[in-house]
Amino acid sequence: MSSIAQNLEKVRGRIAAAARKVGRDPAQVKLVAVSKTVDLARITEARDAGQEIFGENYLQEARGKIEALGPGAAWHFIGHLQTNKAKAAVGLFRLIHSVDRLHLAQALEKAAAGQQKVQEILLQVNLAGEASKSGAPPEAAPALLQEISRLPHLKVVGLMTMPPWFTDPEAVRPYFRALRELRERLLQLRICPLPELSMGMSGDFETAIEEGATLVRVGTAIFGQRD
């Protein structure tokens, strides 16, 4: 068994344990292997070890990997997306995690209509108001969801956040809980179902799962430290 296969096995075990700790079915949590800057050989190892979903931050880098790897993997876009890259993103990715403004959603709508598909997206929320990170303010989420829900070629399936970085996962817990609570408030508006919560990375994904994550974005714990 390769080191990547071993890492995946460990991460899956930790996911299952975190879910069971709070009475959740581990099958409710999907692992997104963050493969930005990871070479194709190591991504192939992960796929051969059963990993199905890969997350990329950069379109140009992702395009080559997607074409080379071929069918059998699902690709999610998890980085900041510029509106002029909307057409390419719709053509490459099953789920776009980082929609944080109406202008971007409208560009994605136009691209999806042109490609005759319904593009699944998540609304990215900046819970801490960090200037260095993308995301809509939580107070803007209801109106943004309402506007995007009117676009026929986009389907909002949940929320995503990138909280402040802390060495202690417990320090991040309030942000994960806040995203879950925001989803509960949005569901009361009966605009659309929001089954997905994308939150948690290598250092804190277990805490995110305890707070309701359905998609965890894990890179370092699978592929090792990046250069």
Image (cartoon, helix red, strand yellow):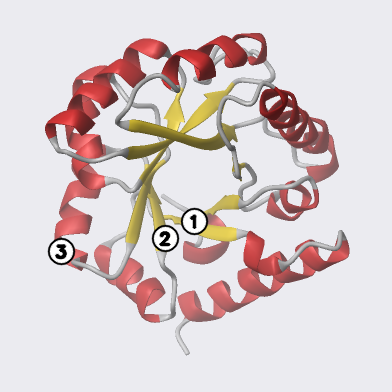
Occupied quadrant, residue 71: bottom left
Which label is found at residue 32? Answer: 1
Secondary structure, mark 2, is strand
Q: Earlier in the sequence, mark 1 or mark 3?
A: 1
The crowding category of the residue bearing disc 2, from other C-alpha atoms within 10 Å (few below 14, some 14 to 19, many at least 20), is many
Cβ atoms at labels 2 and 3 below 8 Å apart: no
Question: Where residue 68 appears, x then y in whole percent?
Answer: 15, 63
What residue would you read off at disc 3? 68
| Mark toward the start of the polypeptide (2 vs 1) | 1
Question: How many callouts does the rendering have?
Answer: 3
- Using the image, determine if residue 106 lies above or below residue 221: above
Task: Give the crowd class for mark 1: few <14, some 14-19, many >=20 residues within 10 Å.
Answer: many
In the depicted view, which residue is nearer to us: 166 or 94? 94
In the displayed orientation, state which residue is furthest to the bottom. 1
Q: Residue at x 61, y 15 (%)?
A: 142
**Residue displayed at 44% across by 77% down:** 50
Tag 2: amino acid: Ile
Q: Amino acid at mark 3?
A: Ala
- Which of the two labelled residues, at mark 2 and mark 3, occupies the earlier sequence position? 2
Q: Is residue 113 left or right of residue 159?
A: left
Q: Nearer the viewer, residue 191 or 137?
A: 191
